[in-house]
Every structure is written in C-alpha cells, then in structure tokens.
Image: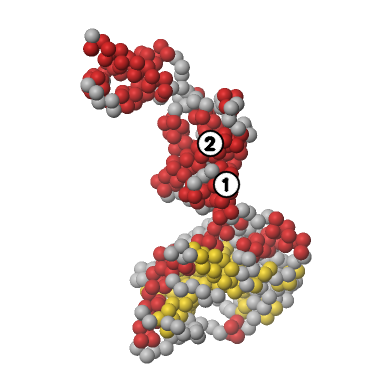
Amino acid sequence: MNNYEIVMGLEVHIELATRRKIFCRCKNTFAEAANTNVCPVCLGLPGALPVLNPEALSCAVRMGLALQGEINRNSRFDRKNYFYPDNATAYQITQFYEPILKGGQVEVQTENGETKVIRIHEMHMEDDAGKLTHDPEMQVSLVDFNRKGVPLLEIVTEPDFRNADEVIAFLEKIRMFALYLGISDGKLHEGSMRADVNLSLRKEGEETLGVRTEMKNLNSFASIRHAIAYEAERQAQVLNAGGRIRFETRRFDETSGTTKVMRTKEEVMDYRYFPEPDLLPVHLPEEYIRKMEEQMPEFPQAKGARYRREFGLTEEEAQILTRHPATASLFEETLQLWQAGKAGGPNTSDGNEGCSEGTEMKRRAKAVAARMCGDLMYLCREKKADPGQWKITPEALAELMQMQEAGAITAKTARDIFARMFDKNIEPMVYVNENHLLITKDEGALEAAVDAVLKTQEKSVSDYLSGKEKAAGHLLGCVMKETNGQADPAQARQLLLKKLAERKAGETT
Ligand SMILES: [Zn+2]
C-alpha cells in the first residue's frame, strides 16, 4: 500500500424535497403506502408526457450557485436507456450532453487545518427509480413506484480526493449547502443523500490514472471510511501480485466490511443516450439567475463571522450556532423578538437607561447563545435529536429569557422550564404562574424559611460558625428548596448571612 497513492472522485445524489415529483404532479413524500403516489407519467404509460417541475429547477440552480460553477443557460434532458423492474419507462430522464451546471469548486478543511479545493466536473438533474423489496420467505420481489420520478441532483467531482477525511469533509459541506438552501435534509442513512466512490491507485509520482472501481451502497460516513480502506488495500494486493484492476461496480457489504462485484461497468455507449424528445430545452434568462442569486442564504462561514462581529460571540459559540440552519434561525429570531420587546414577561429595559442598545443586544445575544450552546446542545445529544426536532419556539424562548433577565424567576427555574420546552409546547409565563414559580419579595415568608433551615441544618450551621464558609452554600440551597424556588437568591443570601452573623455574635458574647 505504501508506494501507492489513492485517487478518488465522487458521484453524489441528492434527493430534492420538492412538493411534487420532477416530471409529474404526484406528491413527493416519504414512507407512504406502496404505489399510492403514482400516475401515468411516472409509471411510464404510453402517451403520458413529462413536464419539468419549476421547483426542482430552482433547487438545482441554487445548488449550482453554491457550488460556484457555471449555470448552463441552455440545458437539456436526455434519455439513458436501461431496463430494470423498478423503472417502468425502461429509460431514465437525465442530463448527459448539456447538464445544468458545468465546473465549480468546493473548499474543504483538511485535517492539518489547510484548505483544499475540490473541483466539480458537473451537476445534472434526473429522476429517481422506484424501489424493489425482496422477500426471501415468500420468494417474491415487490416493486414500489412511489420513489420513481423523485427529483435528484447528481454532483460529479473531479478525481481530487486523496483520503477518506477529504471525502467526508466534502460530503458534510454538500449536506450543509442542501440544508441551508432548504432543498433536502441530506440524510445518508435515509437515502436522501447517496454517495458513490470511484477509487483507483497509482504509483507515487505517476501522472496517469489507474483503472478505477465504483463503490455503491455507502449509507454512512463510517461505511464510506471502511469501504475506502478495504478497496484500496484490495487493489494494492491485486497490483502487487501483478494482476489488473477491472473497471467494475462493487457493492460494499456492511456486515463483512468488504466490497463485492455487483456488475462489470457499462460503457457510456451501452446506455444509448439521446435527447429526450418529450421535454423542451431549459432556457434560463439572466433575470432568473439574478432572482436565484438574491434568494441565496447566508452560509455558516459568513454567518459565524457576523455573529462574532455584531454580537461579540466567541468562535466556538458561532460555530455551534451556525452548524445547522434550525439552530441559527432559533438564535436569530429569539434575539430579534426579545430586542423588539415582543417577548412577554416583565419589561426591564426601563431600568437600563444608562446602557446603549448595542451593549444590551450583545449581552442578550450572549445569554441566548449560552442557553443554546449549553443546555440545548446537551438536550439534543441526550435525546438523540437533530437540530430543529424540538418544540422550542423563538417566542417562548424570548419570553423565558426576558423573565430571567427581569429577575422574575431564578436561573434554576429557567433551566428547568427550558428542558421541558424541548418536547412540549410551553408558554413560560403561563407555566410559571400555574406552578407558582415566580420569585416573591415576601420577606416574612423568606424569614420563616431561613429560620426553619437554621433549625434543621444544625451540622452545617455549626460548620459555618467554626469557620467553614462553604457551608453557607448548602444552607442557601436549603432555603431555596424551602421556598419552592420562589425566593430571590440574592435576597435570601443576604438574610441568611445576616442571621448567621447574629448567631456568631451571640456565641462570642
Ligand atoms: Zn406521477
């Protein structure tokens, strides 16, 4: 293996989350009863005519802009002919001669922190095939055409990858683009993003490419890593033994961790590509491209830089908040509502006349970021939930932040309510009132609570009096508990220390 260099290129398929399929009006939904989202077009019945879904086109153009390639102003569709039982038309509509995107580039961060540019060869639009399920017990194969006609983007890279880390960094970046553009959830394990890896070896220093194999069925980053390691080693052994690599498609088997021949690779001519006669060429006027450019989202890098600049967040906070668009939008919308004074709860801005709006915003941004980077990320890990799979709304979070800032609830109460908000629709104000969690200023009740604690916690009291000042923390916790969290911690602390001092004075006299 040592004297070989691994050379890899990728073909990445992205299933688009459009409302309808690419060439017909069938719904594009996942996991419905078999063969319920079908029509004469996607079933390939004679005489049925396809029409391009404009939503799929806009997804393609925006992804093309993210990939920084040249959007083809005149693209066309072609037929790729092959028979397979999950494909009733006996051809796939794809783009072969004039794809929607030519060229492009994606920057990835390599392990040693450097930036590497991966060149894009092209990207085209096509329709997905149906799905076959094999039932060995019944000895039947079932076909479901719901997926037939689901819009796909296929991104083809140049052979620029040299190791698995680069491949994974690239796929993560493509997934981020898809998420931020809102065109797909990019989930590998659910098949909404699929990657085929073309791999060949060449002697160090050689220019010409070796014969490659194509690996399919890679549905996680872990299997991509394993498949690359296995296949590179296999090819090295063949070459070292004086053998030849055959141009073939291999399937990665997750259980054995090996790749097996699926079919010897077809040559392009086997598919007999020809222009699709039922669809018009796609002509894109300049205004259309401009409109799409205007709709481009702010991607994490730019967004993170803005968070640091405008809100004074740290690099780490900015990174966590921008990793997923759902996290970023919860952060931004919460802050906006809170700043606009739209959050419910007692208002505190009157008391802050001395501080400028900018400092107040930064302070609040820090507070929201802290809650999200800490508690929210913890809850996501704990509940194995993806960002956005929470019930927390910006309105509710802004209200909660406002109540805490106003000193209406304790920090602990705020954290408890936030944790509940994760999977329940909770209005913090209503919840606090119903559960009597508002901090009270009732001094009589507080004094009674302090006295009760001083009586029951004799050990801690005598510890404190003998100089162990840490015991005061425990006593304060008891007081908060005694008041059901409704005491103002600062006020409780003051009163507790006062009473302890009185005791001490009493003891020494
Ligand atoms: Zn259909």
Q: Say how many tags the image has.
A: 2
The secondary element bearing badge 2 is classed as: helix
Q: What residue type is labelled 1?
A: Arg
- Residue at the top extreme? 509
Cβ of disc 2 within 8 Å of ligand 1?
no
The answer to whether residue 291 of the structure is visible from this angle is yes
Query: Which corner quadrant of the image does residue 277 belong to?
Result: bottom right
The residue shown at (50%, 61%) is 172
Residue assigned mark 1? 309
Where's residue 298, x and y in %? 61, 53
Q: How crowded is mark 2: few (under 14 residues within 10 Å), some or many (20 or more)?
A: some
Residue sitting nearer the eye, 97 or 81 = 97
Where's residue 303, x and y in %? 58, 51
Alpha carbon of mark 1 to alpha carbon of mark 2: how far? 13 Å
The secondary element bearing badge 1 is classed as: helix
Residue sitting nearer the eye, 397 or 118 = 118
Q: In which quarter of the image is the N terminus?
A: bottom left
Where's residue 267, x and y in %? 56, 84
Above-or-below relation of 287 to 339: below
Q: How crowded is mark 1: few (under 14 residues within 10 Å), some or many (20 or more)?
A: few
The residue shown at (58%, 79%) is 82
Residue assigned mark 2? 363
Above-or-below relation of 484 to 109: above
The residue shown at (44%, 28%) is 410
Above-or-below relation of 478 to 24: above
Q: Which amino acid does label 2 sit on?
A: Arg
Above-or-below relation of 204 to 216: below
